[in-house]
Image: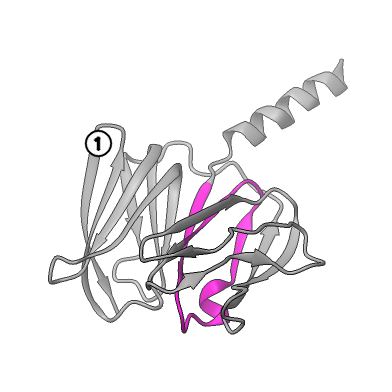
Amino acid sequence: MKKDLLFILLITSIGMSAQTTHVVSWFMGVSSAQASKTINAGDTVKWTWDDSAPHTVTSIAGGAETFNSGQLAGSNQEYSRVFTVVGSTNYRCNIHAMMQGTITTQQVMGTGELNAPDFAFFPNPTTDVLTINSRSVIDRVEVYDQSGRLVVNTTAGNATVKLYMDNYSAGTYYVKAYAGKAIKEMTVVKK
């Protein structure tokens, strides 16, 4: 009986843990540091093409997981993967070998913030990662530069989204997060 109860509590806590979508800009010149992320098991990594060149996102043999986006070309192309196996996976673009990174997946250590406000974003100003949290699933995130040009338009599918802004120019950005019928508009300063 005790084993059954512990099993039910374990499954419940896993179901309650907040999942995160990590958005990685994928472009000629991306550094290995910008393309390398440490995430929790169950998190999603979404690569967005930020140039018009053809690219792949392909795991290198011997890693914890195996994946291949196939060749995609054009700005705003996307490839997503949910990582479930704890360990490290090196990956690269098969067309441009200098484009590479590592996804390190770690065991989920907690259940996250269950009473999050409708939308929260931090830190602001930011130097590298902007985190957006919501009580409900964030459907889409848009980022605009000061001139009003759309820089990122990506779907999310989780209650937490991390935008990696380390390759953005310093300045002010306008971020819109959509969760169901709710929209949060934020002004974010990138140092």
* Residue 94 percent coordinates (x, y): 62, 73
Relative vertical location of residue 34 with respect to residue 119 in this rendering, above or below: below
Which residue is at a point 53% across and 42% down the rendered structure image?
18
What amino acid type should be assigned to the residue bearing mark 1?
Ala
Identify residue for label 1.
182
Question: Hey, which quadrant is residue 168 in on the image?
Answer: bottom left
Coloring scheme of the render?
Answer: one colour
In the picture, measured across the screen, residue 91 lies left or right of residue 182, that is right
Question: Hey, which quadrant is residue 74 in on the image?
Answer: bottom left
Label 1, residues with CA under 10 Å away: few <14, some 14-19, many ≥20: few
Relative vertical location of residue 149 with respect to residue 17 in this rendering, above or below: below
* Residue 131 percent coordinates (x, y): 40, 58
* Residue at the farthest top position: 1
Nearest the eye: 107 or 138: 138
- Any magenta on residue 184? no
Which residue is at a point 55% across and 79% down the rendered structure image?
33
Nearest the eye: 14 or 115: 14
Relative vertical location of residue 114 with respect to residue 70 in this rendering, above or below: above
Disc tally is 1
* Residue 73 percent coordinates (x, y): 44, 65
Which residue is at a point 30% across and 66% down the rendered structure image?
124
In the picture, measured across the screen, residue 16 lies left or right of residue 131, that is right
| Element assignment for label 1 | strand
Please report the bounds of the magenta region as a residue range.
20-47
- Quadrant the N terminus occupies: top right
